[in-house]
Image: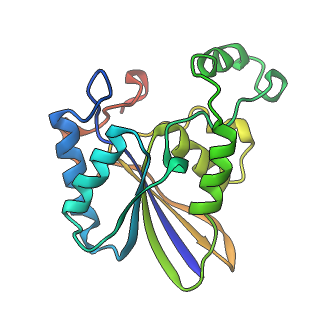
Amino acid sequence: MTRYLYLARHGEATPDESGLTENGRRQATLLGERLKGVPLSAIHHGPLPRAAQTARLIAEQLPDVPVRVSEAAGDFVPYVPAKQELPAQHADRLLGFVGQFPEDGGARLARAAEELFTGPVEGTRHELVVTHNFLIGWLVRAALNAPDWRWLGLNHCNAALTVIRYAQDRPSSVLLFNDMGHLPADLRWTGFPPELRL
């Protein structure tokens, strides 16, 4: 009756995004080590190389956990807001940001991700989804029942961990968000806007 959804952004990617940097590989391995005590039933990952490689490195630390590729865990814009939905003082900047990315069926994939990865289940299930910044923001937004546009501004570091709990007897709960406790200082904050780092 309870699902624990573990969300991780892929490790630091090479400039051409064809795979992971050495730091990204270390990040993924350390995340796998952190998850050794979690009874994961599956590791899902997006189809792009940086997510697939991250999932493989995590799985090397968790040899009995099946690894599955999922288009719904891919890199896409989950929702494009209308200008009137946004706070007036931020609307142009946010729409300019979203406008950099192609329309690629993101709304359909976002719905598929919610159907596949969220909500209560029979028994207790722990699943990891290795994905991208935008989808993590979208699923956290949904868990908090925030407006659809609010996925914007929810940033996630490479190989950081977010955990959401879905149960039948209470609203969904964000238990962890962007947690980097498993990473040493030199591997933290990659993939995060520099002006927002602490």
The reply to whether residue 3 is in sight is yes
Name the quadrant containing residue 16.
top left
Locate residue 160, reporting x and y percent: 35, 47
Locate residue 168, reporting x and y percent: 68, 78
Q: Residue furthest right?
A: 84
Left or right relative to 166: residue 21: left
At 33% across and 73% down in the image, what residue appears? 38
Q: Quadrant of the C terminus?
A: top left
Residues 36 and 185: in front is: 36
Residues 157 and 69: in front is: 69
At 64% across and 46% down in the image, what residue appears? 110
Name the quadrant containing residue 107.
top right
At 31% across and 32% down in the image, what residue appears? 190
Q: Is residue 43 above or below residue 147?
A: below
The reply to whether residue 184 is in sight is no
Name the quadrant containing residue 47.
top left
Q: Is residue 9 above or below residue 16?
A: below
At 33% across and 47% down in the image, what residue appears? 52
Residues 93 and 60: in front is: 60
Q: Is residue 144 above or below residue 11?
A: below
Left or right relative to 7: residue 153: right
Locate residue 31, reporting x and y percent: 26, 55
Left or right relative to 28: residue 95: right
Q: Quadrant of the N terminus?
A: bottom right
